[in-house]
Amino acid sequence: MRREILKAGALAFAGLLAAGRVGSAAAQERWPARPIRLIVPYIPGSAPDVTARHLVDRMGAALGQPVVIENRGGAGGNIGNEAAARSAPDGYTLLLGTNAMLVLPQLHRRSVGYDPLRDFVPIVNVASMPHLLIAPSDGPRSVPELIDTLRRQPGLPYASGGNGSGAHLAAELFKAMAQVDAMHIPFRGAPDIVNNVMSGQVRFGFPTLGTATELVRSGRLRGLGVTSPQRNPALPDVPTIAETVPGFDLVSWFAILGPAAMPDHIVNRVDEAVRTALTDPVLRARIEADGTVVLGMPAARFAEFYQVEYRKWGEAVRISRAVVD
């Protein structure tokens, strides 16, 4: 009798374990069960926002749930980055992050509210894009001419997308390497850089290339140089800055990340969904039309790249001597 009771208990316990495993597997299979929020830490119309809007429909189709963009612009991306870092790691809040999220903590003297290495899990690197040195249509015609102007008139204003943004760091690195001086005027995002350069309120800026491509093609802005080591197919006649300032190389990227401790099965689902979306030739053509380069770098490779980029951009901060109080 005792043996039968023990046997029955063991069978019941085994049944519970099996049910738990089934329940756990079912819970994994059910994700996502509702729409997913994608925080874009920049204003609508910025290059990261445009890339996100190209991506979300096909990403959502691959996941079986809508992916809804929430713009949290300001503070060079700090506001949106911090909001994503503090979100529950359940897969229902993701971040369209950029290289700026690695830079900001290394620029600020005080805490920015998140640690890029501790508070996020890299999922998939979507695309990269150089910055574009722009000037008003009646401004300098080339990088050498801009350098000469800044040496004759030190302190002329330039626009950035906020303290610590990629545009800010690109300009400070340019100043350091070209040995010129200019006054930093921070705005909220790349569209503000374009508008203020175009109006002549500032003399130059470094928005991401995609933000200004059409305006350069139309002649409303002058594109003086791209920040990548190679010329970009979207503006093949625009030289690289490195052709005048040897060694200049600063390329931004756009990636999907999640809050730390996000379960591996969700990371893998998001990674797969994004890379599946990026195989669509129509989507790739739309993304690449403005000079963006599609990457689709998977989670394992992106995690290694993320660590290397943290050190690389930290070195750029040191060289530029850029600091945000």
Image (tube, rainbow, N blue to C red):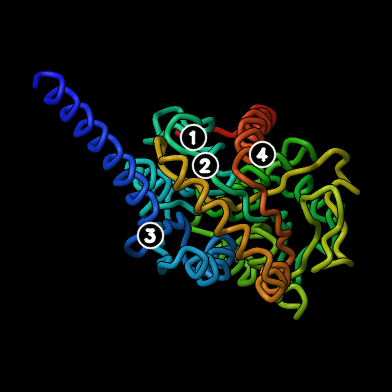
Q: Does dot 1 land on a helix, a strand or a loop?
A: loop
The answer to which of 140 and 294 lies nearer the viewer is 294
Q: Which residue is mark 4?
A: 301
Look at the picture and state if 33 lies above or below 169: below
Q: Single out the residue that lies furthest toward the bottom.
A: 218
Quadrant (top left, top right, bottom left, bottom right) of the C terminus: top left
Give the Cα distance between marks 4 and 2: 18 Å
The percent coordinates of residue 181 (x first, y second) are 69, 42
Label whose residue precedes the other's in the sequence (1 or 3): 3
Give the Cα distance between marks 2 and 3: 19 Å
Look at the picture and state if 201 lies above or below 99: below
Look at the picture and state if 311 lies above or below 78: above
Q: Which mark is residue 116?
A: 1
What's under tag 3, amino acid-wise?
Arg
Q: Does dot 4 land on a helix, a strand or a loop?
A: helix
Q: Which mark is residue 49?
A: none
Viewer-side label of 4, 3: 4
Q: Which residue is mark 2?
A: 101
Label 1 packing within 10 angstroms: few (<14), some (14-19), many (20+): many
The percent coordinates of residue 296 (x first, y second) are 67, 54
The percent coordinates of residue 31 (x first, y second) are 37, 55
Q: Which mark is residue 37?
A: 3
Residue 222 appears left or right of 259: right
Q: Are marks 4 and 3 in contact (CB under 8 Å)?
A: no
